[in-house]
Amino acid sequence: MLLGTLFDRFVEQAPVGVAARATLEAALNPAALDSLFGRTAEKQYHRELLFSTCVDLMGLVVSRTHRSINAAYQASAAEIAVSIQSVYAKLANVEPLTSAALVRHTAGRLTPVIRRMKGHLPPPLKGFHTKILDGNHLERTQRRIKPLRDVAAGPLPGQTLVVLDPVLGLAIDVVCCEDGHAQERSLLAEVLTLVQAGDLWIADRNFCTTKFLFGIAAKSARFVIRQHASTLTWDKAGRTRRSGRCDTGKLSEQTLWLTNADGQTLAVRRVTVTLDRPTRDGETEIHILTNLTAKKASAQKVAQLYLTRWKIETLFQTLTTVLKCEINTLGYPKAALFAFCVALTAYNVYATVKAALRGAHGIETVEQGVSDFFLADEIAGTYRGMMIAIPAEHWQPLADADAKTLAQLLITLARKASLPRYKKSPRGPKKPKPRRTRFATAKHIATSRLLADEKPRK
């Protein structure tokens, strides 16, 4: 085994924590990160503070090991040769292209590891590389930096478009924008540069534009995207045909002939789901556009493919509840976007550990029985103590481990994990909130008196 006797107790008691730290070391090899910075940075350059050190500091915050950059710096000050002011200055100027390259780097490093462990999920549609696209607006920040101190409105540090590979469970790419007010559709030109032949892109209606659909089709790729009411133009529509049912309603489909600004035409299928129950917005129908042929995907399959969008919603939920993807003390857009991208790399590490569990215990067992919250909680709970007991230099051999070696190590650790410790606690359907009518005129009411069914004092 790659790990020495110093690791034995942690391997036996906290194998998932060891697996996460081993994956992190391999995914974020300092030499590789500094080389990445040298290739992608256009204005920044290395001095005493290396890019790999910035990633390490930010990683301690997004993983909730330390509450802030300053706290992470204080814990590592003996190893960093610059002041905290220099650290913040460096973070405030990390270029978005470098931050995005960091996400691609970790995804590329971990993809062969997941495949060797056989921890990947079945493809949503055989023969295509499925990619799910969604946007995330970063929440408003505090007003710590001088230009924000007299601003009443909430300052928005930026937004991102994230690309998820649902088979691997990895965030494989991200588009970063410093303008928090920019429309997500304005970033689609950058997304088109990521489209490759054989792709299948799944997205919500906010990304349904004539230019984007034509752009995907022009690259011999496919799409399953919900139709937007006002961002699409077509020349004519075919007759509507009934197509059976899916889990949420009745299905029908028709052909639309889209037209672009150059007068070109693109024939697409429009699958309509007439819902059994209206959405929260009161909608009774959902229209899904695709250039998949009926031979490749029936109407039922198209509706099912669109529903796989929930996987990227799970990614964002994990980033928010398990990781600290939005650090509201970082007012500079570049720093906030960098923090979000480091959180995506941490998510990829987590996704790889979960893939190891699937490879060791089976896909169905892990997907249906393992709680993301409890799994991540153990990783966070053991991390700091493990790093004190086992200094960083003992992890360095993992930095250069190849995919085969790392996959074997992770599978070995995953087999030692006791899955009942991370068992899901399924909840029943949500109940409607009751109207709050009791004691409407009282400012406060003691809970103990309510439990004793007493009236509040006037």
Image (tube, helix red, strand yellow):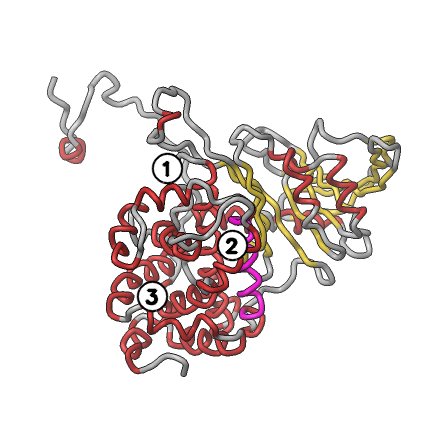
User: Of discs 2 and 3, which sits in the foreground?
Assistant: 2
**Placement of 37 over or under 397, stated as above or below:** above
Q: Nearer the viewer, residue 224 or 55?
A: 55
Q: Is residue 427 above or below residue 18?
A: above
Instruction: Name the residue located 81 percent from the left edge and 47 percent from the top edge.
Output: 218
Which of 449/364 is in front? 364
The verdict on residue 312 being magenta is no
Q: Which residue is mark 1?
A: 328
Residue type highlighted by circle 3: Arg
Quadrant of the image occupied by residue 389? bottom left
Looking at marks 2 and 3 on the same chain, the residue that comes earlier in the sequence is marked by: 2
In this figure, which residue is indicated by the disc labeled 2? 37
Disc 2 to disc 1: CB gap under 8 Å: no
Q: Earlier in the sequence, mark 3 or mark 1?
A: 1
Which quadrant holds residue 213? top right
Give, as a single range, the part of the protein colored magenta.
Answer: 98-113
Q: Residues within 10 Å of mark 3 (few under 14, many from 20)?
A: few
Secondary structure under tag 2 reads helix
| Residue reaching furthest to the front | 47
The location of residue 64, given as percent across then percent down, is: 33, 51
Where's the C terminus, which quadrant?
Answer: top left
- Residue 91 vs residue 189, the one in the foreground: 91
The residue lying at 43 percent from left, 57 percent from top is 52
Foreground disc of the pair 2, 1: 2
Q: Is 91 displayed left or right of 451 in the figure?
A: right
Q: What residue did someone put label 3 on?
A: 421
Residue 48 locus on image (x, y percent): 38, 54
Q: Amino acid at mark 1?
A: Asn
Q: Main secondary structure of the magenta part?
A: helix
Kind of residue indicated by mark 2: Phe
Report the residue that reaches farthest toward the left: 457
